[in-house]
Amino acid sequence: MYKNLKLSIKLIGFKKLLSYAFFQKILRVNGSVPWPVHWTSLITDWKNIKLKSHPPFPGFMPGQYIQAINGIEFGENVIVGPGTKIVSASHDLDDFKKHKEVGPIIIGDNCWIASNVVILPGVELGNHTIVAAGAVVSGSFKEENQVLGGVPAKVIKKLGPYSSK
């Protein structure tokens, strides 16, 4: 089923893992993805996703759309909220059947992507970046310790260094 069943049960809980497994492994909703994915989320090209560590798992929260045609790299301790869209490839403007090739989306360590955020192709987020709910991130923000918000996203606050206790 999942690669590390004992760890998944410990982190997610048996009842929740059972419901995820029913939709994912029996009904085949995101059936090929090797980590737990919520049945209302969709992950495409999951083999192009690099996880520095997990959990949390991409697609775990409800309503996420994660398209990894050009690749997505998640750092350690990255939390992605419900309804978030992470799209690594846009369509070619001259031929909609093709996708533009750009670099992968890179999300640094200790990042929090809040609810209903949209991250567009080629974006790079530095370590300890928080993206406020509803923001649309169309450009890179490589510095550390920042809060982004708005449409299009911009730096709205600087933070101190990340510290986990």
Image (cartoon, helix red, strand yellow):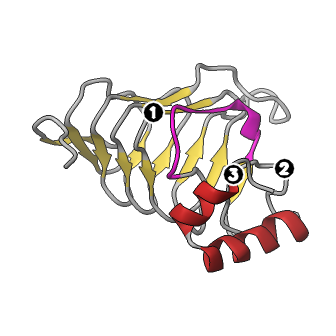
| Residue extending farthest bottom | 15
**Would you say 27 lies left or right of 159 here?**
right
Q: Residue at x 79, y 57 (%)?
A: 30
First-in-chain label (3 vs 1): 3
What residue is disc 2 on? 32
Whether residue 152 can be seen here: no
Name the disc covering residue 116, or none: none
Q: Amino acid at mark 3?
A: Trp
SS for callout 1: loop
Q: Position of residue 10 (x, y in %)?
A: 54, 64
- Which region shows up in magenta? 44-56
Camera-nearest label, 3 or 1? 3
What residue is disc 3 on? 35
What residue is disc 1 on? 75
Classify 19 as above or below 105: below
Classify 142 as above or below 118: above
Q: Residue at x 53, y 38 (%)?
A: 120
Q: Residue at x 82, y 29 (%)?
A: 98
Residue 48 in magenta? yes
SS for callout 3: loop
Classify 21 as above or below 122: below
In 3D space, how far apart are the residues under numbered discs 3 and 2 (Cα atoms)?
9 Å
Category of crowding for the residue at label 2, using alpha-carbon neighbours closer than 10 angstroms: few (below 14), some (14–19), many (at least 20): some
In 3D space, how far apart are the residues under numbered discs 3 and 1 (Cα atoms)?
16 Å
Relative to the observer, which residue lies in front, 63 or 25? 25
